[in-house]
Every structure is written in structure tokens, then in C-alpha cells.
Amino acid sequence: MKITAFYSFKALTEDECARLRDALHTFGEEHDMRGLVLIATEGINGTVCATNDVMTLWKKKIEEHFGDMRWNDSEAETHVFPRWFVKIRPEIVAIKKEEIVPQESHYLSPTEWNAMMHDDVAIIDARNTYETAIGMFEKAIDPKTQCFQEFADFASSCDLPKDKKILMYCTGGIRCEKAAVAMEKAGYTNVYQLKGGILNYLKESPNTHFKGECFVFDHRVSVDQDLKPSKRYSLCPHCGDPGDLSITCVQCGKSGIICKECSQKDYQLTCSKLCKHQFMGLQKRVVV
Ligand SMILES: [Zn+2]
Ligand SMILES: [Zn+2]
């Protein structure tokens, strides 16, 4: 299966949004595609999974509407999404601040990024903690956001010198389109963004300055340096964050994978929500 992530900030009218939603939804259904596509008056954003042949048709179809696109491609053995969704939303990447409108910004290719990252710069990861926890650029600043809407607050409270060269990155580049503007609104005058994000960077520069794995929002959990589905992480059944700690469940005896944080809580070492529930119930009875 081919997987591709893409976005465009080419504006659409509300009528165009509705027509496009219907057309893309039908196309995907007819071709057994899976994934999530968001359409808004500001543009389109999606990650979709399909066979090789269908993906070629899909790309053609999208480019008919949006012109040339950057496609962040990867591969997996099977579908990586459970279903097919095409939805209309107020934003294609939600920062929930109307004044932040993406604009043509300073893009860096992976080569330019590598050349610049050793200068006197601040590298900022525009992703959330469950993502930064499993992989980041070396020396990057982690804003410790739980969701992207918190990024604008980080930008205004961040106390770097305003003329500092700021290098920003995210998974596929779309969040930086707004995060970079948030930094500029906060007074930063020298903001750059990694074009195509980590996914494009790893294609050109694997096993260099990005360390660890890149979280993705589908069954793969994350991709490794070769953009292959993670062999290391699965989603923790308790909190939904990536985990890589193998355990033997204290309740059912099966093996499972949970995250480090949950392993330190009092329902530690259970393999599922159900086992946790049963285990905690037992504990309570023992105490009483
Ligand atoms: Zn957990
Ligand atoms: Zn269990």
C-alpha cells in the first residue's frame, strides 16, 4: 500500500468545498481508499492510503484542483487507517486564532536545513509532547504543547531574542505554515520552516540530525528513519501515547506493550483497559 500526506493552502469557496468533498469521498469509496481528508475554505490537508494504481489517480485528481503538490509518500503492507473520511472543517490545521493566516514563508529544503542548523539558531519543534517524546531534531526546543492550539501561547511566551534565527519543523510541514506565522506575530523577524517536514527530511537525509522515530496519526504509530512502519512503538492501551515497554499483564498473563509513564502508575503492568479495570477492582477488594 502507498500512503501519502499532502496539503495546500489554495483558497476555496464554500461551494467548492462541498463539491470537492462529495467528489473526493465518492472517488475514495469507489477505490477502497482509507484515511482522512480535511477540506476548508483555506485549502486541503490529508493523509490517505491506497494501492499504487489508485494513488496515481488520486494524485492526478488532487492536482487538477490544487496544481502541483508536495507528496510525502511512504509504504506499508496493509491499510493503515480503519476507514475513509472526507470532512469539511473550519481549518485544515486548527490553531483557532483567526489572525494567523499562512503566508509564503521562508522555506528550507533538507539540504539548506542541514547547512543552517549548525549556525547560531534556535530549532523549534512545532509538534506535541506525545510526538516529541519518541523523536526530535538534535538540540531542538520542545514547546511541551498537548495540542497545536497551545502553540500560539508558546510563541508569545517564548523568550528568545527577537532577531534570533528560528528554524521550525513539524511532521509534514503544515503545522509550521501557521506556527511560523505565530512566531512572526510574536515579534520574531527571522523565521524559517522545514519544507515538507520530517517526512520529507527523512527521505533525503535519514540517520543524520533527526533522532528517533516520527509519530504519524495512523496504525503505524510512527515511521522509522527509512519511513518504514515502526517496529518499536505501539499505542499504549491506557493513555493512547506511543509506548515501547513490553510487559506481562498482571491480570491476564498475556504480553503487551504500554508506555513508560503508565507503567509507573498504580494500575501498572496491565495490558488493556479491561484488565486494568479488573485488576483495580481486585485490589480494592483486597484492601477492604
Ligand atoms: Zn500510557
Ligand atoms: Zn491483560
Image: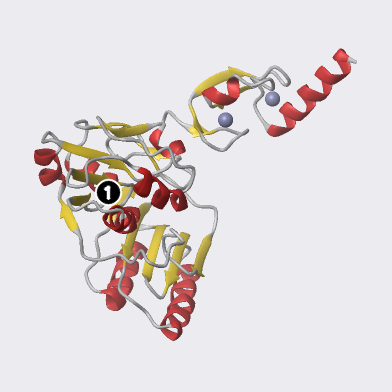
Q: Depth check: 175 or 186 in front?
A: 186
Name the quadrant containing residue 10: bottom left
Q: Is residue 202 above or below residue 57?
A: above
- Quick check: can you spot residue 33? no
Task: Check disc 1 and report the residue beneath it.
Answer: 197
Residue beneath the point at 53% across and 26% down: 259
Question: Callout 1, which amino acid?
Answer: Gly
Residue 92 in the image: state x and y as whole percent: 42, 64
Write down which quadrant ligand 2 falls in.
top right
Q: Residue furthest bottom?
A: 15
Kindly identify the residue that appears in the image at 82 percent across and 24 percent down: 281
Relative placement, left or right, of 17 versus 106 is right
Q: Position of residue 147 (x, y in %)?
A: 48, 47
Q: Would residue 102 be seen by someone viewing this image from the given angle?
A: yes
Between residue 274 and residue 164, name the one nearer to us. Answer: 164
Ligand 1 under 8 Å from disc 1 Cβ: no
In the image, residue 109 above or below residue 85 = above
Say if 210 sits above or below 177 in the image.
above
Q: Quadrant of the C terminus?
A: top right
| Residue in the image at 86% along x and 14% along y | 287
Please indicate whether residue 88 sits to the left or right of residue 142 in the image. Answer: right
171 versus 212 height, above or below: below
